[in-house]
Image (spheres, grey):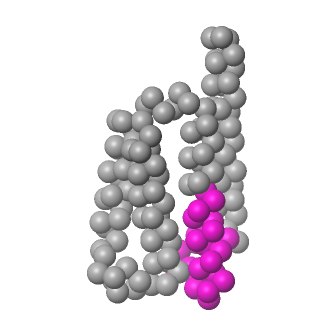
Amino acid sequence: MKTYWLIVTVLLVNLSSLLVNDYFPGTLAALGIPPWILFAVIALMVLLSALTLKTRREKKRYMIIFPVLMIAVPVLVLAVSAALGGEPNNSISLTSPSLWIGAAVTLWFFWLEYVRASRKEAEDT
């Protein structure tokens, strides 16, 4: 359980840091953090989660918690960054249709997986 939350926390912190750096260029440089390290850590966390969290996928609540957190927190960071006057250097912003389409598709796929797991659980009992 602790591994799951550690991975989620590290992913969210890294993603949020990259988004803040996008809205306020130079933030990571001012902190002395090269962006490639954040991308490497994200790749490592994804690999680690694929190897260690297979048993968590069987628990239905993780099928909802993970995608909601991975969408809600970055959207909140985008909203706060925009409210503070930041301008995105990339096309990732709250007005980007691709952001909302990607979020909707991601939630839809995780919801379908949740429904499939619920049916399988009902059949097994």
Count of number-bearing discs: 0
Residue 75 left/right relative to 16: right
Residue 105 left/right relative to 4: right
Residue 13: image quadrant is bottom left
Q: Position of residue 15 (x, y in %)?
A: 47, 64
Q: Position of residue 43 (x, y in %)?
A: 35, 52
Viewer-closest of 117 and 102: 117
Q: Residue at x 51, y 32 (%)?
A: 57
Q: Residue at x 63, y 59 (%)?
A: 72
Residue 56 on the magenta segment: no
Residue 4: image quadrant is top left
Image position of 36 with respect to 30: above or below: above
Q: Position of residue 98 (x, y in %)?
A: 65, 61
Point out the image quarter for the N terminus.
Answer: top left
Q: Residue at x 69, y 16 (%)?
A: 122
Q: Position of residue 109 (x, y in %)?
A: 64, 39
The magenta stretch spans which residues? Answer: 71-94
Image position of 62 with respect to 41: above or below: above
Q: Residue at x 31, y 76 (%)?
A: 33
Image position of 11 with respect to 17: above or below: above
Residue 77: image quadrant is bottom right
Q: Is residue 98 visible?
A: no
Viewer-closest of 69 and 110: 69
Q: Is residue 125 visible?
A: yes
Point out the image quarter for the C terminus.
Answer: top right
